[in-house]
Image (cartoon, rainbow, N blue to C red):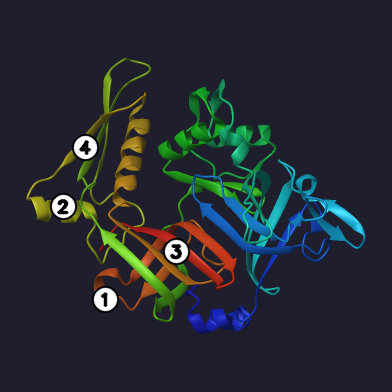
Amino acid sequence: MAAKALDELAREHADFYVPTFTVTVGERDVVRDLFLTVSNVQLDLKERTPGQFSFTVANAFDLERREFEAMRGDRPIDLFELFAFGSPVRVRLGYGTGPAVELSGLVTELSTSFSSGGTPELTIKGFDALYPLTIGKSTRNWEGRRDSDAVTDVARGRGVTADPERTEPVRPRIDQSQQTDMAFIEFLAERNQATFYMRGDQLYFGRRHNQDSAVVSLSWGFGLVSFAPEANLARQVTEVQVHGRSATEGKEIVGTAKRGDETGRDTRASSGSERVVNALSSSPILSVRAPVHTQAEADERAKAILDERAQDFVTGSGECIGLPEIVPDVNIELGGMGRGFSKTYWVSEATHKLDSGGYSTSFKVQETTV
């Protein structure tokens, strides 16, 4: 499917004229049902990290009662009760009834400021369903299971629905040793060259979609407000060697990954590992020791390290008009910036913000070639 150009996006989003948002607490829409004045709505989305929401309630302080209250008819609403810690919140940003970006989470932070210049406002922040996985540490194990099975079990134990891509192989034993659930899932993601994040109400765990088609196409000055890319050889290597010891025979094993093994690379351009050879007239090798016990596991870990470094070769941050389509783990096509930096990039972070200046999307991207 071809990337959507600016004119097609404009048709889908009513020419970007009327950005809208919805904030619900429990089953109540705080604007339409409770008549609260809400501003500065923001969603911060990242891979391998809990997503965060924030919004501000204006006119939140009753000067006569000296309490954070809002009136619904003649009945006061206690805002500290409405936005109590742990309250379920869903935030939606978009244009009318068209495509939107959403985040479901729970309240974790309340803040305000008292000054002589105006009525205090109340800012509410929180995280998506990955946040509880960062609290507490566990020790447990699985025998004769896949890593994806362990992800499903951990998520289910926290009340999170998960549909991970099936991983291979079946492992003799999987250990979680005094780790948070988040750190454990991140470890499993690293050794399977995977990523994870909440999309809607479901945990995704699987391959990065950095080889998929771009979802939108923007050019500098035409939807793309700013973009600051950087190509840096600092962390580039031509080969990764991972040293471990066989669990069955106790022999030394070495897993390897070499330039050309990177995933998601543009074959029409040069990768960081190819560029570093030309720049240094040598072939730098990264050698590490890791707790791997089979040849396949050692090779997987080496490939994951090479991929992680390759994705650091070209990075960038940018801002565009508000586009709900731009979320972590999608590709976007950026043009109008010369041969070197006009290309398709993979999105690692996206921030959607609606304030007095309108709806904007900022993002961070990665690429393996230039």
Residue extending furthest right? 74
Q: Amino acid at mark 4?
A: Leu
Amino acid on which the number 3 mark rests in the picture: Asn
Q: Label 3 neighbourhood size at 10 Å, few (<14), some (14-19), many (20+)?
A: many
Nearer-N-terminus badge (3/2): 2
**Whole-number angstrom distance, CA of label 2 to CA of label 4:** 13 Å
**SS of the residue under disc 3:** strand
Name the residue: 65% across, 78% down. Answer: 18
- Camera-side mark, 1 or 2: 1
Residue at the disc numbered 3 = 331
The circle on residue 338 is 1
- At mark 4, the secondary structure is strand
Q: Is residue 7 left or right of residue 100?
A: left
Q: Which is more N-terminal, label 2 or label 1?
A: 2
Q: Where is mark 2, residue-wise?
A: 276
- Residue that carries the numbered disc 4 in the rendered image: 286
Label 4 vs 1, first from the N-terminus: 4
Q: Are marks 1 and 3 in contact (CB under 8 Å)?
A: no
Locate residue 160, reporting x and y percent: 67, 41
- Between residues 89 and 311, which one lies in front from this camera angle? 89
